[in-house]
Image (cartoon, rainbow, N blue to C red):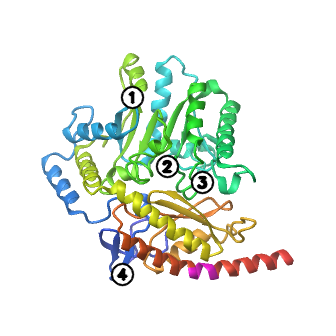
Amino acid sequence: MKSALLKHSIDKPLAMVTHGKGIFLYDDQGRDYIDGSSGAMTANIGHGVTEIAAVMKEQAERVAFAFRMQFTNGPAEELAARIANLAPGDLNSVFFVNSGSEASECAIRVALQYWKEQGRPEKVKVLGRKISYHGMTMGALSLSGHTGRRVDYGPLLHPFPVAPPAYAYRFSIDGNNTEAYAAAAAQAFEDAIIEQGVESVAAVIAEPIVGAAGGVLVPPPGYFKRLREICNRLDILLILDEVITGLGRTGAWFAASDEGIVPDIILTGKGTSAGYTPMAAVIIREKIVDAMRAGSGYATLGHTFSANPLSAAVCLAVLDYVERENLLENTRVRGEELRQGLEALSQRYRHMVDVRGRGLLWGFEFVLDRSTKKAPPSQRSASAVFVQECFNEGLIVYPAGIAPLNNAIIVSPPLIITRDEVQELLRRLDKALAKMELAMNAWTETEAEIHLA
């Protein structure tokens, strides 16, 4: 029968998932798949955790929904306090939304309201980087330097992504050490701010590790400390988009702590609920809330399902699970094992380059030639081909990057993964890479023939 469910690739058939357990998903043909990307870097505690389902049932039987302007509720109050306590510095207030995209939208409103309350309504721009992704809604996509996802919306979007990325593999100047590149990349961001007009800039937004747009682009050490100093000096808010990295993915509660900075706003999403319910959060520094309190007295933000007790209770149970099972430590240990395995594979397969990451968030990209770093032609998406090869081997990975610049892959299994499961993931990845190597060799030969012609 024809499906009534509209899918991303409209006519492409998809496997029918039936259930999941731990790091595995199962389809209706009895096949198992290692969820090597946690879906979309989301299923942090794995699948089928019965205690989460029990909490969901218990809370639904008590009260599932209460509108935030009529009631507060215990689970939301406790969750906000827990998250604020885990966040660095004085990020002490939390507003809940349903997704990372909504968190980005909310951050725009918070930044603009802050400056209005300060008597500076001319500060209205929120600047992002040219390789970045902050969500699919109009405001969030306006912040995003993801050309593939912006193209269909044309003039409806603001041209906010203006700063060059911190992407050493492709943009570091030969001979630069990491400190020099960190300084140059941060200076490029400052130059972009100045070109836009400092007086009009309300905030800048950046992912501490770029996910979908770049394929796990890790900044050079010191980059974010320099960016924090620039924002302080120019009187601009710093928003850190931790929708992927927040709440455990890097082996710390927040990547901001990895970087040793306190941003003005942090966005969380995927790890907030680990996929068990739609829930995301905007975490806000004291000075911003103080300005709202002293000014209008309102946080003019809105969402029907914000802080709903059902989702809040589920997220509390997820946090409990992460803490009780010591998953931050497991993430650091298993992440090191995954790094070693990926780097070993990169030495064996000549088209697999630049293994990069932190914790259980890793990426690499494909090139036709290591010496030139040339990416495969855009009409042959290496990322998409490799995702299918992995799927055929019972492994789910995530395609990333922006053609024609790069074709990247994200490997980000659930934080519960064991040592033996890491090795099994690498075994399945190895089998897919062997097939991918043959395809890439053929593409390389074709490119050479075209060049000779």
Q: Amino acid at mark 2?
A: Gly
Residue 152: image tag: 3
Label 1 to label 4, Cα distance in Å?
48 Å
For the residues bearing labels 1 and 3, Cβ distance under 8 angstroms: no
> Is 318 placed above or below 88 here?
below
Image location of residue 272, percent across then percent down:
34, 49
Number of marks: 4
Q: State the SS at label 4.
A: loop
Q: State the SS at label 2.
A: loop
Q: Earlier in the sequence, mark 1 or mark 3?
A: 3
For the residues bearing labels 2 and 4, Cβ distance under 8 angstroms: no
Residue 31: image tag: 4
Label 2 to label 4, Cα distance in Å?
32 Å
Q: Earlier in the sequence, mark 1 or mark 4?
A: 4
Left or right placement of residue 445 versus residue 264 in this view: right
The residue that mark 1 highlights is: 300
Q: Quadrant of the C terminus?
A: bottom right
> Is 203 placed above or below 215 here?
above
Q: Earlier in the sequence, mark 4 or mark 3?
A: 4
Q: Amino acid at mark 4?
A: Arg
Q: Residues within 10 Å of mark 4 (few under 14, many from 20)?
A: few
Q: State the SS at label 1.
A: loop
Q: Residues within 10 Å of mark 3 (few under 14, many from 20)?
A: few
Label 4 to label 3, Cα distance in Å?
36 Å
Left or right placement of residue 182 versus residue 433 in this view: right
Region in magenta: 434-438
- Closest to the camera, between mark 2 and mark 3, is 2
Residue 42 appears in the rendering: no
Image location of residue 184, percent across then percent down:
69, 42
